[in-house]
Amino acid sequence: MDYNKIVGESLEEVIKQKDLTLNRLAQKTGFTPSYLSKIVSGKMPKLPVNTLQQIVGALDYSMSDFMGLVDKKKSITSVDMTIEDFKWQFCSPDLS
């Protein structure tokens, strides 16, 4: 399982915990529901870190708590990610 998929599944889990819809999250973040859907489904190839921070913040989570959740899921699926993978996937410019 790729890292974007794990991030998306983690976001979906938190969204459900917070009893939110993508429409409500879109209102809180300013992103469109379809853009958020791509992220949650793991279909966003280069999710900018500032976008993830904005979404996580709207969910009243800290980045460190959220990344802990992601790391936990990553460990369960036995996916390894190098720092270069992280830079490639999460440190690209936000083009949304």
Image: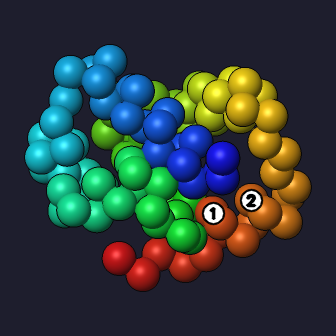
Residue 94, compared with residue 25, is above or below; it is below
| Residue 18 marker | none
77 displayed left or right of 10:
right
Which residue is label 2 attached to?
A: 86
Q: Determine the secondary structure under disc 2.
A: helix
Q: Nearer the viewer, residue 3 or 77?
A: 77
Q: Determine the secondary structure under disc 1.
A: helix
Task: Kindly indicate the quadrant of the structure image that contains residue 69.
Answer: top right
Q: Residue 65: percent from the left, percent from the top? A: 59, 26
The residue type indicated by label 1 comes to Phe
Q: Residue 39: percent from the left, percent from the top? A: 40, 56
The residue type indicated by label 2 comes to Phe
Q: Quadrant of the C terminus?
A: bottom left
Q: Dot 2: within a 10 Å radius of its alpha carbon, few (fewer than 14), some, or many (20 or more) residues?
A: some
Q: Residue 31: percent from the left, percent from the top? A: 24, 61
The residue located at (72%, 71%) in the rendering is 88
Task: Kindly indicate the quadrant of the structure image that contains residue 33.
Answer: bottom left
Judging from the image, the colouring scheme is rainbow
The residue located at (47%, 45%) in the rendering is 8
Res 52 visible? no
| Residue 90 marker | 1
Residue 72, compared with residue 51, is above or below; it is above
Residue 19, compared with residue 77, is above or below; it is above
Q: Are marks 1 and 2 in contact (CB under 8 Å)?
A: yes
Residue 71, compared with residue 84, is above or below; it is above
The residue located at (13%, 41%) in the rendering is 24
